[in-house]
Image (tube, rainbow, N blue to C red):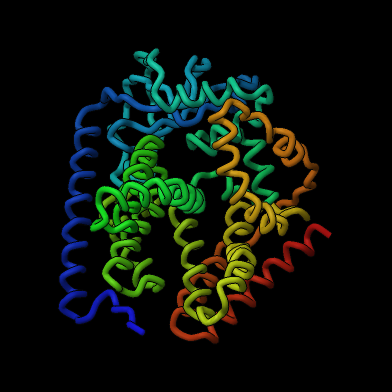
């Protein structure tokens, strides 16, 4: 049996890769800094941005009256995210292009990279529907229920959910199913591979038997997924998953070791070098954590049969991701552990829902969504110090080194889970 080749066979290979990534990271940061200097060169700047969120807030004025105002979250064409406010509701929908004059002269480079607030003046609203907005309109036409429409738009076009639905899904432990991530990409990849397999083999046997089915299928699937990624404006978790997919296939095709922390580390470092803003993306790091714990399971339990791995991995990931879910989001309910079941069922629900929307029966599964959305969760807010999460992350990283730390990590996660269950009983 052939053994897998490690990613870096010598110190020289490691150093060359390190210098290449350092060069890419330096270039990316310089480009970002140049954009920052252009934005802050004058007191105000003209910006074209896409509306990502719009919601209402209130404040107590000096006169004692409660004043309402609109908060807008926007993403510019130069990829920076900023917030602004308006006394009146801006007559725009999520995904619409807006031209603004913004006053951002006093922001720091760190604020530019992480998101900032700026006073603004709306100059023009684009009336042209983007491809994404057109798809959202088509989805809305297939549903009578507003909440179901919102869920499917989040699933297919990464449109942000309403805050109340988002909180409901958080308490149910299924936020990761609605926010497009690597899990969705893996389901789509498997679906595309299944659809391409037999037509490709038919053509291959007739016209190009010398071609590799696996390589050609991957190239076609990668192009489709990249187009979808760009269509969605490259959500961080999906971007991470796509890069890992490409790196993983390249390593697999060259007979290198695929399931290793080196592979994950290389993917993360390369992504951060290319897109420095990902360093400040919570969604990106949660996505990385999920993959890390899958790799950790396979590192120590790769001797188990494929059936046992398939059964145990959802439980494993759920338990080890519990500290992130509770400490960061704080929502927990008695239904939260059932997310293991929802996650397993989602592998069938997701491709089936796509098919039903394509044939005009998109509302066929709305009854199940309504049951989930209208479920009385009696969610409880659980407050835990962020120091616990820092300690947990350190334990998790040490688990790569020795199995005893893996046991401590698992014990720590179970302790937090038991504490959460105790809080709702």
* 98 over 266 or under it: above or below: above
Can residue 283 be seen?
no
Locate residue 30, reporting x and y percent. Answer: 18, 48
Locate residue 88, reporting x and y percent. Answer: 52, 15
- Please tell me which residue is depicted at 55% across the width and 26% down the height of the picture: 139
Residue 107 quadrant: top left
Q: Nearer the viewer, residue 327 or 45?
A: 327
Q: Indicate left or right for 355 with 271 as reference.
A: right
* 308 over 222 or under it: above or below: below
Locate residue 266, reporting x and y percent. Answer: 31, 66
Q: Nearer the viewer, residue 230 or 125?
A: 230
- Please tell me which residue is depicted at 59% across the width and 41% down the height of the picture: 352
- Please tell me which residue is depicted at 51% across the width and 33% down the height of the picture: 159
Can residue 376 be seen?
yes
- Which quadrant holds the C terminus? bottom right
- Which quadrant holds the N terminus? bottom left
Q: Nearer the viewer, residue 248 or 218?
A: 218
Q: Indicate left or right for 300 with 106 as reference.
A: right
* 290 over 174 or under it: above or below: below
């Amino acid at each position: 049996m052939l053994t897998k080749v490690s990613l870096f066979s010598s110190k020289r290979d490691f150093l060359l890769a390190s210098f290449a990534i350092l060069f890419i990271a330096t270039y990316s940061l310089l480009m970002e800094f140049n954009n920052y200097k252009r934005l802050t060169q004058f007191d105000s700047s003209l910006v074209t941005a896409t509306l990502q969120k719009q919601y209402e807030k209130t404040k107590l004025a000096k006169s004692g009256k409660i004043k309402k105002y609109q908060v807008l979250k926007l993403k510019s064409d130069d990829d920076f995210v900023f917030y602004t406010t308006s006394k009146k509701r801006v007559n725009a929908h999520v995904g619409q292009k807006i031209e603004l004059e913004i006053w951002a002269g006093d922001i720091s480079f760190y604020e530019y990279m992480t998101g900032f607030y700026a006073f603004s003046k709306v100059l023009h609203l684009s009336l042209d529907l983007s491809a994404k907005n057109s798809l959202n309109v088509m989805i809305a036409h297939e549903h009578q229920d507003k909440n179901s429409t919102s869920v499917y738009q989040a699933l297919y076009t990464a449109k942000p959910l309403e805050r109340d639905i988002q909180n409901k899904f958080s308490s149910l432990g299924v936020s990761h199913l609605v926010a497009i991530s690597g899990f969705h990409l893996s389901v789509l990849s498997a679906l595309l591979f299944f659809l391409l397999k037999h037509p490709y083999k038919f053509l291959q046997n007739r016209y190009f038997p010398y071609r590799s089915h696996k390589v050609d299928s991957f190239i076609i699937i990668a192009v489709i997924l990249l187009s979808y990624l760009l269509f969605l404006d490259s959500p961080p978790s999906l971007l991470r998953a796509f890069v890992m997919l490409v790196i993983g296939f390249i390593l697999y095709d060259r007979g290198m070791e695929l399931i290793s922390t080196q592979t994950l580390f290389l993917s993360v470092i390369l992504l951060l070098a290319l897109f420095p803003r990902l360093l400040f993306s919570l969604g990106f790091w949660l996505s990385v954590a999920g993959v890390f714990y899958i790799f950790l399971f396979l590192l120590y339990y790769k001797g188990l049969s494929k059936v046992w791995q398939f059964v145990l991995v959802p439980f494993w990931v759920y338990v080890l991701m519990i500290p992130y879910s509770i400490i960061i989001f704080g929502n927990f309910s008695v239904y939260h552990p059932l997310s293991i079941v929802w996650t397993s069922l989602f592998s069938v629900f997701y491709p089936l829902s796509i098919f039903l929307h394509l044939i005009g029966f998109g509302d066929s599964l709305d009854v199940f969504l309504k049951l989930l959305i209208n479920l009385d969760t009696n969610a409880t807010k659980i407050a835990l110090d962020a120091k616990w999460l820092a300690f947990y992350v350190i334990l998790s990283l040490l688990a790569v080194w020795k199995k005893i730390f893996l046991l401590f990590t698992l014990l720590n996660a179970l302790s937090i889970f038991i504490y959460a269950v105790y809080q709702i009983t």
